[in-house]
Image: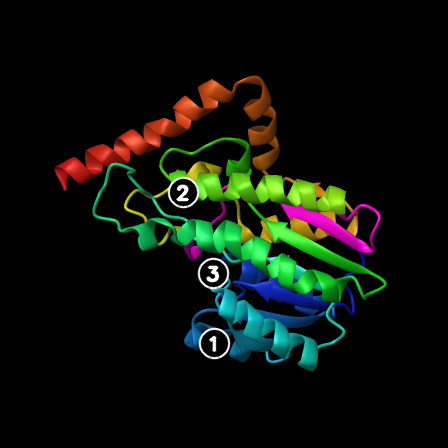
Amino acid sequence: MELKNSTILITGGTSGIGLEFVRQLTYLDAKIIVTGRNLHTLEETKKRFPKAHIIQSDVSEPESIERLYAEVVQQFPELNIMINNAGLMRQIDLQDNAMDLLSINQEIATNLTGTIQMTHKFLPHLKTKSSAAIINVTSSIAYLPYTIAPIYSASKAGAHAYTKVLRLQLEDSNIKVFEVLPPGVRTNLQNHWELPPPEGRMMDVEKMVRDAIDGILRDRPEITPGLAKTVKVLGRILPNTLIKYGHGEFKKLKQLRVTS
């Protein structure tokens, strides 16, 4: 897939993986449109990357997507690539009744529903381009449930299944469908966590995105940077062992909450 001189929309592009995509794709001379919920972080992104275009938008809200679509197709009719990157990950105890229904649904609304709604809205526009792509950033957790982050696990597994179906349904179209399944990556996604992830298995965000872009340029439909390859293989041959290993972190979180 050619990225140079493309016009690329990146959701959740003000921090972490999304911001690194902005940085590296800018060096490839792509025109970048960055979306995010927070106007302040959007403005900070604009200061760092003056050539980037910023639009405030929330992928979890259908009305916000409608407004985003109208603005983008009017200002950037050449848009041909979309990166569904916006994500939310929380450490949740499913027996904690303090969370209301709206709160418990936040990750589904962002990670899964947001990806589906963005794709559904922009798909007709992308079909008008001679060369187009949809790039969904999911997670290697899509291969195996991670008990310390149950709603995130469910949403990313759903996004993984959706992406595979989307790719098949679009197989005879001009739109290429890519999926990036990162392992644990050092970003601010974990800043609010009570129990930090094991440092030894976290991947540097710059290398992760570099590997992802390399996979896109090579037309690899499913891209598994770093330890994601290992998770994919072990998820097939030793799924229960790997799930139990990850469940140890949830037990540590439970103990931490008891003693704090």
Residue 51 percent coordinates (x, y): 64, 79
Q: Residues within 10 Å of mark 1 (few under 14, many from 20)?
A: few
Residue 59 percent coordinates (x, y): 51, 62
Q: Is residue 183 magenta?
A: yes
- Closer to us: mark 1 or mark 2? 2
Instruction: Say which element carries label 3.
Output: loop
Q: Which residue carries the number 3 mark?
A: 60
Q: Residues within 10 Å of mark 3 (few under 14, many from 20)?
A: many
Instruction: Say which element carries label 1.
Output: helix
Residue 252 percent coordinates (x, y): 27, 32
Kind of residue at badge 2: Ile
Residue located 55% across and 25% down the image: 235
Kind of residue at badge 3: Ser
Marking on residue 151: 2
Q: Residues within 10 Å of mark 2 (few under 14, many from 20)?
A: many
Residue 153 percent coordinates (x, y): 46, 39
Q: Which residues are magenta?
A: 170-189
> Residue 52, can we see it?
no
Q: Which residue carries the number 1 mark?
A: 44
- Closer to us: mark 3 or mark 1? 3
Residue located 67% across and 69% down the image: 26
Instruction: Say which element carries label 2.
Output: helix
Residue located 46% across and 39% down the image: 154
The span from disc 2 to disc 3 (Cα, nearest Å) is 15 Å
